[in-house]
């Protein structure tokens, strides 16, 4: 067989078939499989370890490992670790079923080593008013869990081509109490509202179709932001001029910090916030 996808699919089918065998035959089959894989794993490790001693061979090994079949085999035997891009894609795959259930999806734009990724929402998730919650409670959290070395996760701006039909994020069902905050009509496009909810002073913001909510505290010194000015979707701290993107809470002045996000959803024209979560 020369087709890698077909080979991997057949291996997956055989693995699934093992689960349908009776306990004793299945256990024997798994022991045989594991023993064979361990035999080849150790043999390849010794071969690679020896060849790496020669500088010319080490360079050639890197070229050979880029062959899809060789790479897949070394990955299966756990001789090679998954690349950062593979692990990011695995993280995105873990949330895609929920996104697709709402008619949306997420695409990886690029991985910039050592610690930055850029992505975009597509379909109904593109420009959805609940996209901030989807980003923080779903996509960003999944990437951080699978790739803890990633420190900067950037969301590309909405293109406006999505359906925008899903006003409630697929992650809005997460545990926690929802509190009424305001009606959509009360929150002007490009403006902010301040609300005291569950003992927290919060800022509600609306930029186009995107509704977001943040704790009213500058990430710089924790001073209130709500008296600041809003310019083209950016909230400027009235104390020291730090600038924050109201779509995501990202600090444009010092990208390493951002506002503390609170989950928000739209229900029948009203904005609800999950606050008091710490």
Image (cartoon, grey):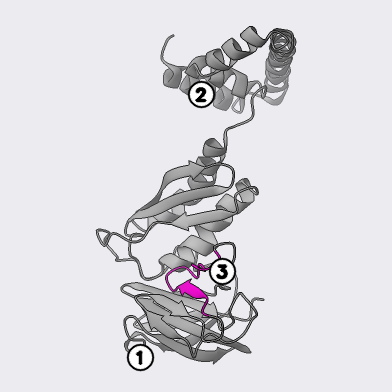
Q: Quadrant of the image for the C terminus?
A: bottom right
Kindly indicate whether the residue at mark 3 contacts the one at mark 2 (C-beta within 8 angstroms): no
Residue that mark 2 sits on:
13
Q: Can residue 198 be seen in this view?
A: no
Asked if residue 5 lies left or right of residue 23, the reply is: left
| Residue 246 in the image, given as x and y percentages of width and height | 44, 74
Distance Cα–Cα, label 2 vs label 3: 45 Å
Q: Is residue 162 magenta?
A: no
Q: Residues within 10 Å of mark 2 (few under 14, many from 20)?
A: few
Q: Is residue 232 placed above or below 94 in the rendered structure?
A: below
The alpha-carbon separation of the residues under discs 2 and 1 comes to: 55 Å
Nearer to the camera, 68 or 101 = 68
Q: Which of marks 2 and 3 is in front?
A: 3
The mark nearer the N terminus, 3 or 1, is 1
Quadrant position of residue 77: top right
> Can you identify the residue that label 3 sits on?
258
Q: Is mark 2 on a helix, strand or loop?
A: helix
Residue at left offset 66%, top offset 11% = 55
- The residue mark sitting in front, 3 or 1, is 3
Q: Main structural element of the magenta stretch: helix, strand or loop?
A: loop
Along the line of sight, the residue nearer the viewer: 272 or 110: 110
Quarter of the image where the N terminus is located: top left
Instruction: Identify the mark at residue 186; answer none if there is no mark.
Output: 1
From the top left corner, tell me how far across and down residue 20 is, in percent: 59, 27
Question: Marks 3 and 1, Cα distance to the nearest angstrom?
Answer: 26 Å
User: Residue 275: percent from the left, percent from the top?
Assistant: 58, 80
User: Which residue is rendered at x = 44% and y = 88% of the image?
Assistant: 193
């Amino acid at each position: 067989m020369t087709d890698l996808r077909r080979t991997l699919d057949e291996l997956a089918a055989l693995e699934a078939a093992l689960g349908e065998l009776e306990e004793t035959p299945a256990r024997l089959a798994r022991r045989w499989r594991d023993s064979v894989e361990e035999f080849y794993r150790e043999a390849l490790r010794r071969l690679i370890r020896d060849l790496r001693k020669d500088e010319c061979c080490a360079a050639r090994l890197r070229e050979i490992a880029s062959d899809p079949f060789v790479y897949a085999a070394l990955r299966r035997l756990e001789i090679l670790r998954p690349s950062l891009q593979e692990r990011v894609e695995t993280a995105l795959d873990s949330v895609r079923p929920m996104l697709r259930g709402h008619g949306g999806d997420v695409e990886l734009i690029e991985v910039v080593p050592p610690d930055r990724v850029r992505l975009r929402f597509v379909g109904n998730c593109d420009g959805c008013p609940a996209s901030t919650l989807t980003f923080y409670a779903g996509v960003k959290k999944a990437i951080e869990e699978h790739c803890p070395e990633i420190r900067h996760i950037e969301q590309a701006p909405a293109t406006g081509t999505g359906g925008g039909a899903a006003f409630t994020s697929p992650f809005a069902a997460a545990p926690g109490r929802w509190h009424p905050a305001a009606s959509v009509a009360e929150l002007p496009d490009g403006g902010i509202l301040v609300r005291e909810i569950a003992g927290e002073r919060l800022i509600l913001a609306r930029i186009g179709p995107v509704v977001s909510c943040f704790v009213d505290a500058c990430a710089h010194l924790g001073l209130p932001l709500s008296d600041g000015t809003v310019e083209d979707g950016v909230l400027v701290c009235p104390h020291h001029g730090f600038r924050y993107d109201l779509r995501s809470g990202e600090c444009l002045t010092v990208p390493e910090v951002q506002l503390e996000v609170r989950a928000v959803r739209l229900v029948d024209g009203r904005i609800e916030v999950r606050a008091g979560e710490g």
